[in-house]
Amino acid sequence: MSFVLGRDGDRDRGPVGHLGSYRALDGTSGAVLYCDLDGPHAVTIVGKRGYGKSYTMGVFAEELAKTNGLAPVIVDPMGAFETLAETNTDTERDNKIPATVIDDPAVKPTALDPQSWCGLLGLSPERGAGGLVWQAAQKTSTIAEMRAHIDGTDAPQIDKRAARNHLHLAESWDVFDATGLEATDLAGPEVTIIDVSGLESAPMNAVCRGVAEALYRARVTETIERLPWLLLDEAHTFFSGVAEPALERILTRGRAPGVSLVAATQRPSAVPALCLSQSDLLLAHRLTAQTDLEALVAAQPTYMNGSLADTDRLPETPGEVVVIDDATETVHAVQIRTRETPHGGNSPRASNVEI
Ligand SMILES: Nc1ncnc2c1ncn2[C@@H]1O[C@H](COP(=O)(O)OP(=O)(O)OP(=O)(O)O)[C@@H](O)[C@H]1O
């Protein structure tokens, strides 16, 4: 017996990923549970710190990398997913996942629209320096051209200087390049891990925006064939920055061009309600903060009995989830399977420090 989440049909109707197994009340595991990987999906994974969000996302990544026709891309804010390319020394099985790591990602300046350039630099588009940056972003396609455009205007010197200084800051992040990442660089069958760890929130968001835009546009214009799956850990960081419009577009309009999103967050109350309401699969690890529980309850579907905020509803142990599946309008108690590759998000322990 097995069940396929996200699909109103059985296992033979297209590729699936092995996520785990049913969790019985006595803790024993039951039938195997799969997830549909044939069509596009919006998946949200929530849970408090240390209860398995990144681990679960790693399981998704392993399954996506094994499936033909998909292009999995992880935006990795903690540098926790590079271990996908490593052998698991616990199992000693050579289960390496084909993976490419992009360590110093750069995106095209044109990935951001004029409004987002102002947002990125903390400038009001209605005033002085912000207005100059807006016009420059509208008319040019590199940071150097933006600066030259600003220099060529007859705006007050003080505004020009402020605009130039802000652009200089953006340039110093080293994440903008006219030859930055293209969708074709990201659309291979292997997992592409974009390591944005070490970047501040603003440049991290700029990279995420560029990647999300490039993948979406490439599917709309049919420049890439594989169906992209964009995986975002710490998704609240991106939903509260300039990446947000591109993510929202995938959530609301990604289905037709076949673009999927898997977003993990420890703070469901800090992502837009749309993220939860547009997800057709919600995986909830343990949560205890009242505001986060309220955000889940607000998005809870009508076909679910009882409340997600009931204390005994959400699991207590890392690796266990409640899954709400909108395709089949069903709710499941699940134990996520063991990773095939090493998990890279383990917390350091003082007892392991050798001095
Ligand atoms: N399905 C699972 N099977 C076995 N162990 C698991 C599973 N899920 C989580 N764990 C254990 O729980 C630990 C914490 O998981 P993980 O790093 O994914 O937490 P997290 O929710 O992403 O935390 P943070 O928000 O701090 O990043 C893992 O290191 C692992 O030991």
Image (spheres, helix red, strand yellow):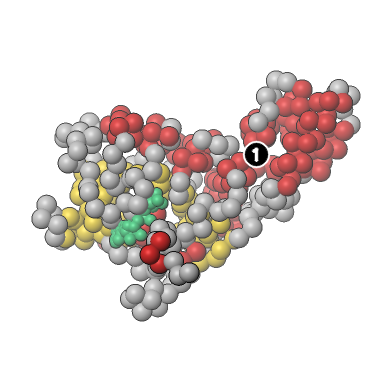
Residue at 22% x, 49% y is 316
Residue 35 in view here:
yes
Q: Which residue is mark 1?
A: 112
Residue 62 in view here:
no
Residue at 34% x, 45% y is 48
Residue at 87% x, 33% y is 151
Taking the image as shown, residue 351 lies to the left or right of residue 146, namely: left
Query: For the residue carrying disc 1, how many other residues have a C-alpha within 10 Å: few (<14), some (14-19), or many (20+)?
Result: many
Residue furthest out toward the top: 126
Q: Could you say where residue 192 lies in the image, as x and y percent from the top left?
A: 53, 60
Which quadrant is home to the N terminus?
bottom left
Q: Amino acid at mark 1?
A: Leu
Q: Could you say where residue 160 lies in the image, as x and y percent from the top left?
A: 83, 29
Report which quarter residue 44 is drawn in: top left
Query: Which secondary structure lies at badge 1?
Result: loop
Task: Identify whether 322 is placed above or below 93.
Answer: above
Taking the image as shown, residue 220 lies to the left or right of residue 166, namely: left
Task: Identify whether 343 is placed above or below 309.
Answer: below
Task: Identify whether 178 is placed above or below 353.
Answer: above
Report which quarter residue 131 is drawn in: top right
Taking the image as shown, residue 242 lies to the left or right of residue 277, namely: right
Taking the image as shown, residue 128 lies to the left or right of residue 268, namely: right
Q: Could you say where residue 37 lies in the image, as x and y percent from the top left?
A: 36, 55
Task: Identify whether 19 is placed above or below 306.
Answer: below
Residue at 55% x, 65% y is 100
Ligand 1 location (quadrant): bottom left
Residue furthest out toward the left: 26
Report which quarter residue 126 is drawn in: top right
Q: Could you say where residue 247 lies in the image, as x and y percent from the top left?
A: 50, 40
